[in-house]
Amino acid sequence: MDPMLNIAVRAARSAGRLAMRFYERDDALKVSTKGRNDFVSEVDRACETAIIHELRGKYPDHAILAEESGSLGGNEFEWVIDPLDGTTNYLHGFPQWSISIGLRHRGIMQQAVVYDPLHEELFTASRGRGALLNDRRIRVSNRRGLEGALLGTGIPFREEGDLDLYLRMLRVLISDTAGVRRPGSAALDFAYVAAGRLDGFWELHLNPWDFAAGILLVSEAGGTVTDLSGGDRYFDTGNVVAGGLKVHQAMLKRLRPLLGGQVTA
């Protein structure tokens, strides 16, 4: 295992142990509101602190971009961290949340870890070396279109102006498919696409820490990730479409006519 990936795995497991200690003990947690339907708990902060401590203990000069701490300066290597992706699920005891750590160098993703402590599933990828679930290599599904496809998504909960657009997207994508799932942890959604559990995924207005690790997992598993225009500006826009090549193409074909300038692709 690459040394940088190894330290990211160690950091994720450290955070996972902390998160499990308080899972389904919401009465013991202090929770505050960052924005509408956007919560942060002391577990989020403790997990992030643990991750940063591990990473900077080994790589003190690396930059950090983390959900709670924001941007911490450093060199051309940058760790992108979501210490608890799916906080609302976590606080409700809904078993779909994860820890996401990605490393990019000059803007290019190099290492990825998405860890699900509840199910002991560790998704990892290194650029050019493929993607793994625990010790098993994973690949995106080979589905050739939307017929029978299972898609994942995230419903906008802060940007009310885009809800109507999203519902139109849902209408055109749900047709002919096996259904659409909204589990609530984007990092795990990407990991599930990489593992072939979901055939495709799309969401609007994500933050970089929501999907930085996920896009490398999907691409190293043989899939495709773009913004809504089919380009690579997802870090700028927060809008993503992911899947195997044929499913991704089919999703974009249905989504593009709906844009009409309402959302920066």
Image: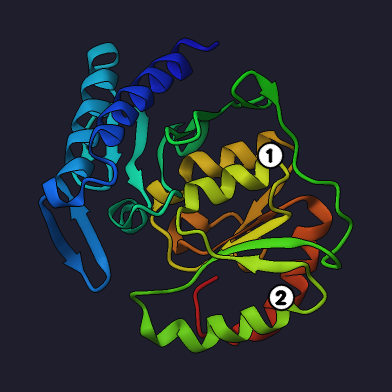
Give the amino acid at mark 2: Leu
Give the amino acid at mark 1: Ala
- x 71%, y 69%: residue: 179
Left or right of 77 in this view: 147:
right
Residue 142 location in percent, x, y? 85, 47
- x 69%, y 52%: residue: 198
Q: Quadrant of the C terminus?
A: bottom right
The circle on residue 195 is 1
Q: Nearer the viewer, residue 149 or 24?
A: 24
Q: Earlier in the sequence, mark 1 or mark 2?
A: 2
Residue 214 location in percent, x, y? 54, 43
Q: Nearer the viewer, residue 74 or 204?
A: 204
* Number of residues whose C-alpha sits closer than 10 Å to that of mark 1, classed few (under 14), some (14–19) or many (20 or more): many
* Element type at mark 2: helix
* Element type at mark 1: loop
Asked if one can make out residue 147 in the rendered structure from this viewpoint, the answer is yes
List the residue tagged with mark 2: 173
- x 67%, y 33%: residue: 220
* Alpha carbon distance from label 1 to label 2: 21 Å
Q: Quadrant of the N terminus?
A: top right
The circle on residue 183 is none
Q: Is 254 placed above or below 105 here? A: below
Residue 228 quadrant: bottom right
Q: Residue furthest right?
A: 144
Left or right of 214 in this view: 95:
left
Residue 184 location in percent, x, y? 45, 59
